[in-house]
């Protein structure tokens, strides 16, 4: 059964908030967010996860993308307003506790102009749609995307 998550697209000053990741043989960026806890709405989860992972306060505006994997919705990606905070990984965040040489996390802002060459790996379908949407405007209804393996 896939892990259902809530993730955020947050822009501020022509930059996108992303989580930089290093894993064995891989360096890439992902859309910040995480697991939806029992009794929690996806909107509540995205606010909590962004605070936990990036120290940033955000407000969900609307659902942008449903990312599917093996015919099941796995990720809800929300357009969020940036409220406050400077991206950093709090010492008590699960990602900070789990960090080691082969598994590192670093939240930060990436210039929108650099997105086309920023590696997203499994998140490439989100990057492709986001680049299109930033140029042409976001759809009024959520877009369903297929995640890569």
Image: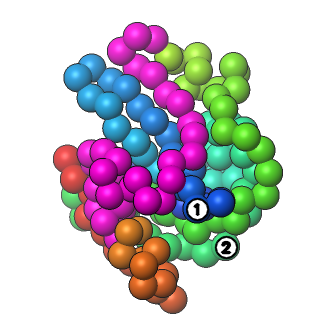
Left-right relation of 27 to 85 = left
Q: Which mark is residue 61?
A: 2
Q: Which residue lies furthest to the bottom in this view?
A: 140
Among the 4 quarters of the image, the one containing residue 70: bottom left
Q: Give the residue at x 73% y 40%.
A: 86
Badge 2, how many Cα within 10 Å: few under 14, some, many 20+?
Answer: few
Which one is in front, 51 or 68?
Answer: 51
Q: Give the residue at x 50% y 16%.
A: 99
Q: Mark 1 points at which residue?
A: 14
Q: Is residue 27 above or below residue 14?
A: above
Among the 4 quarters of the image, the one containing residue 142: bottom left
Task: Report the Cα–Cα distance between label 2 and label 1.
Answer: 18 Å
Among the 4 quarters of the image, the one containing residue 143: bottom left
Among numbered discs 2 and 1, the one appearing first in the sequence? 1
Which one is in front, 6 or 41?
Answer: 6
Which one is in front, 111 or 145?
Answer: 111
Q: Is residue 31 above or below residue 80?
A: above
State the count of labels. 2
Residue 111 in picture, x, y percent from top left: 50, 53
Q: Give the residue at x 59% y 21%.
A: 96
Which residues lie in the magenta part? 100-129
Circle 2 SS class: strand
Q: Is residue 77 magenta?
A: no
Q: Give the residue at x 27% y 29%.
A: 26
What's the colour scheme?
Answer: rainbow
Mark 2 or mark 1, which is nearer to you?
1
Q: Is residue 68 visible to us here?
A: no
Q: Is residue 54 visible to us here?
A: yes
Circle 1 SS class: loop
Q: Residue 118 carries which label?
A: none
Left-right relation of 27 to 101 = left
């Amino acid at each position: 059964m896939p892990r259902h998550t809530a993730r955020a697209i947050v822009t501020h000053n022509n930059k996108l908030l992303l989580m930089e990741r290093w894993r064995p043989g891989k360096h890439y960026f992902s859309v910040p967010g995480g697991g939806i806890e029992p009794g929690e709405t996806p909107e509540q989860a995205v606010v909590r996860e962004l605070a936990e992972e990036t120290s940033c306060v955000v407000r969900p505006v609307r659902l942008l993308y449903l990312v599917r994997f093996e015919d099941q919705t796995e990720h809800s990606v929300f357009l969020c307003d940036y409220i406050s905070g400077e991206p950093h990984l709090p010492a008590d965040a699960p990602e900070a506790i789990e960090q080691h040489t082969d598994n590192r996390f670093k939240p930060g802002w990436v210039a929108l102009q650099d997105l086309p060459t920023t590696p997203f790996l499994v998140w490439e379908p989100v990057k492709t749609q986001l680049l299109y949407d930033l140029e042409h405007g976001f759809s009024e209804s959520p877009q369903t995307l297929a995640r890569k393996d």
